[in-house]
């Protein structure tokens, strides 16, 4: 295993089991039939456990961090869009014109952009943690050097610390990078021993020829990562990328800082799989916002034992699916915290009603 201090995580403390038990007990006293709110009840219990209190509090400082990075493999026809779009979209995020910005305004979330490996110069405000310009083309070369992968993981950890220290009480990792579903699929398929053809999706909407090129690139990259698949840091170095490594560090550090996370789509969840390898138990601090149309996403969610909140056929990324799920999570919190109990409302539970005993001869 790689032994740089920045890639070694302390043991993850799980969410508070006593708070979760208290949430379950409170659900049984609320003015509704037991279990009638379905997953809202389990999600409310998860938030209570993460916050260590029951009833839980509504999230007041949700924060999205969009990790931006280019990938050399995008130059080989695996995407429907040119690689230049990554830098253009970074500017669009900063101008407030992307889907993630629009969705954030409806949920009370704020958006930060972090240029980790965009193949262009970007606004200095977003490039503080930049590792390099574009990761390598993983079908034929390593994505990163040993120094770069350690720096990328450290960057993700630092960003998580910055956000938690500034008051964020819920984190969402988003991403932007043309071609990034290719390394994401390599990570997921390699960690789950899934055949490329069963994991490869259309990404940005490639045609059949593009899908064939993408499948071939993923197959070649999976051959390259096979010797290092048991080492999460080396796996990110060979078959991932700087943005994926930073997201993995971010997600693991969020768990270390006891801060809940809503996961987004296939790219973020690929990073989450590696984060769980870096910091076992981190997944207990995450909830899956949605299920992407990318086949590899379902594979990754199953491995992480996470059930998505939404299934809306989304595949945009940016954190958009996670933001779409945020109101549902807030609804889970407010029903648990603000509904009246049977005792408070003076509503009979049915168990307290007098039942007349039938007369006998």
Image (cartoon, rainbow, N blue to C red):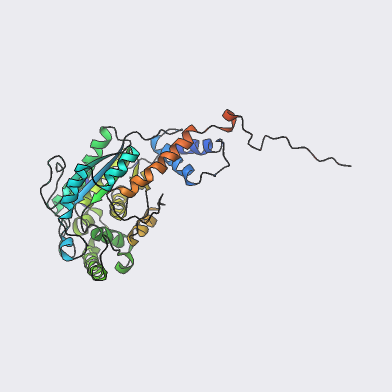
- Percent position of residue 189, x then y: 30, 62
- Percent position of residue 105, x then y: 31, 39
Q: Which residue is most to the right?
A: 361
For the residue pair 224 and 36, the one nearer the viewer reads as 36
Q: In this view of the protein, can residue 208 be seen by the observer?
A: yes
Image quarter (top left, top right, bottom left or bottom right) of the C terminus:
top right
Left or right, 58 with respect to 178, comes to: right
Task: Name above or below for residue 140 compared with residue 13.
Answer: below
Residue at the spot 57% in from the left edge and 39% down from the top edge: 32
Left or right, 234 with respect to 338, comes to: left
Count of marks, rendered view: 0
Quadrant for residue 163, please give it: top left
Residue at the spot 34% in from the left edge and 62% down from the top edge: 295
- Percent position of residue 209, x then y: 23, 71
For the residue pair 106 and 136, the one nearer the viewer reads as 106
- Percent position of residue 174, x then y: 27, 48
Residue at the spot 33% in from the left edge and 60% down from the top edge: 294
Q: In this view of the protein, can residue 281 be seen by the observer?
A: no
For the residue pair 150 and 221, the one nearer the viewer reads as 221
């Amino acid at each position: 295993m790689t032994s740089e201090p920045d890639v070694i995580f302390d043991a993850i403390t799980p969410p508070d089991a006593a708070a979760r038990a208290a949430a379950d007990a409170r659900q049984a006293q609320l003015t509704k039939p037991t279990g009638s709110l379905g997953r809202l009840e389990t999600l409310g219990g998860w938030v209570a456990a993460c916050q260590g209190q029951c009833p839980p509090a509504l999230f007041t400082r949700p924060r999205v961090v969009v990790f931006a990075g280019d990938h050399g493999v995008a130059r080989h026809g695996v995407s429907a869009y040119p690689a230049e779009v990554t830098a253009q979209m970074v500017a669009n995020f900063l101008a407030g014109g992307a889907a993630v910005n629009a969705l954030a305004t409806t949920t009370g979330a704020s958006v930060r952009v972090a240029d980790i490996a965009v193949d262009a110069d970007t606004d200095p405000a977003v490039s503080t943690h930049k590792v390099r310009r574009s990761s390598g083309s993983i079908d034929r070369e390593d994505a990163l050097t040993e120094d770069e992968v350690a720096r990328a993981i450290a960057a993700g950890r630092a960003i998580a610390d910055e956000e938690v220290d500034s008051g964020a009480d819920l984190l969402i990792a988003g991403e932007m990078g043309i071609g990034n579903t290719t390394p994401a699929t390599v990570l997921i398929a390699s960690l789950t021993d899934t055949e490329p053809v069963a994991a490869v999706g259309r990404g940005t909407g490639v045609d059949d020829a593009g899908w064939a090129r993408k499948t071939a690139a993923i197959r070649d990259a999976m051959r390259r990562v096979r010797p290092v698949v048991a080492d999460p840091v080396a796996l990110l170095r060979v078959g991932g990328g700087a943005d994926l490594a930073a997201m993995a560090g971010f997600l693991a550090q969020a768990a270390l800082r006891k801060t809940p996370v809503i996961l987004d789509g296939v790219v973020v969840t690929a990073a989450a799989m590696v984060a769980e390898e870096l910091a076992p138990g981190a997944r207990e601090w995450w909830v899956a916002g949605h299920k992407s149309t990318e086949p590899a996403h379902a594979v990754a969610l199953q491995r992480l034992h996470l059930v998505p909140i939404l299934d809306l056929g989304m595949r945009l990324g940016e954190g958009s699916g996670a933001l779409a799920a945020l109101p549902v999570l807030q609804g889970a919190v407010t029903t648990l915290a603000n509904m009246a109990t049977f005792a408070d409302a003076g509503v009979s539970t049915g168990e307290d009603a007098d039942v007349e005993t039938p007369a006998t001869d």
